[in-house]
Image (tube, grey):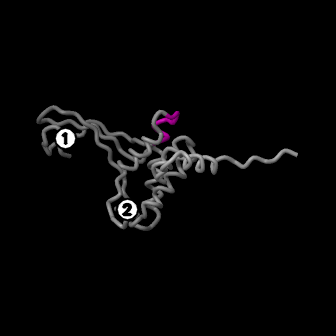
Amino acid sequence: MRCPFCGNIDTQVKDSRPAEDHVAIRRRRFCPACGGRFTTYERVQLRDLVVIKSNGRREDFDRDKLERSIRIALQKRPVEPERMDQMISGIVRRLESMGETDIPAKTIGEIVMEALARIDTVAYVRFASVYRNFQEAGDFDKFVSELRPPVQPEE
């Protein structure tokens, strides 16, 4: 593993342990050339996924991009980081086990919305506002009204 500080390719692993609910390995590394210490994560990747954007453009699936968008939606919400990591790992496993290497961005968005709806409705609405490209306050009203159960008339 190349040292991010000096570029030396001969770094040493000082400590390894399971991370993210045993779906990754966290390694503490040391560079003997510059003395720098850094952490790497190793995950199983079943297949290389390609995201098909709505305009037809193709790009490699980026777990970090998925994680950033979920963290933004969950920012300042009472959700533990471990739960967030489990959700992200679950989404990636679900995408990898679909059997397809080409996955439409719409499918990924729907899976993320489904997962967010289960753990935090505010994060769900935040993500949906970007994903569905809300343009005005009425878009929020319509979306939130669909979340609420219909009110039963009193007899």
CB atoms of marks 2 and 1 within 8 Å: no
Q: Is residue 81 left or right of residue 39?
A: right
Mark 2: amino acid: Val
Residue 125's x, y, as percent? Answer: 53, 45
Residue found at x 32% / y 61%: 59
Name which quarter of the figure residue 103 lies in.
bottom left
Residue 17's x, y, as percent? Answer: 36, 39
The residue lying toward the viewer, choosing from 36 and 151, is 151
Residue found at x 42% / y 41%: 72
Q: Is residue 134 left or right of residue 52?
A: right
Q: Is residue 150 left or right of residue 53?
A: right
Residue 121's x, y, as percent? Answer: 57, 43
Q: Is residue 1 left or right of residue 49?
A: left
All told, the count of numbered labels is: 2
Residue 11's x, y, as percent? Answer: 18, 41
| Crowd band around label 1 with a 10 angstrom C-alpha radius: few (<14), some (14–19), many (20+) | few
Foreground: disc 2 or disc 1: 2
Numbered circle sitting on residue 155:
none
Q: Earlier in the sequence, mark 2 or mark 1?
A: 1
| 76 part of magenta stretch | no
Numbered circle sitting on residue 4:
1
| 79 part of magenta stretch | yes
| Crowd band around label 2 with a 10 angstrom C-alpha radius: few (<14), some (14–19), many (20+) | many
- Please say if 89 is above or below 48: above
- Look at the numbered disc 1 and give the secondary structure of its residue: loop
Q: What residue would you read off at disc 2?
A: 51
Q: Which residues are magenta?
A: 77-84
- Look at the numbered disc 2 and give the secondary structure of its residue: strand
Q: CA distance from mark 2 to mark 1?
A: 28 Å
The residue lying toward the viewer, choosing from 133 and 31, is 133
Mark 1: amino acid: Pro
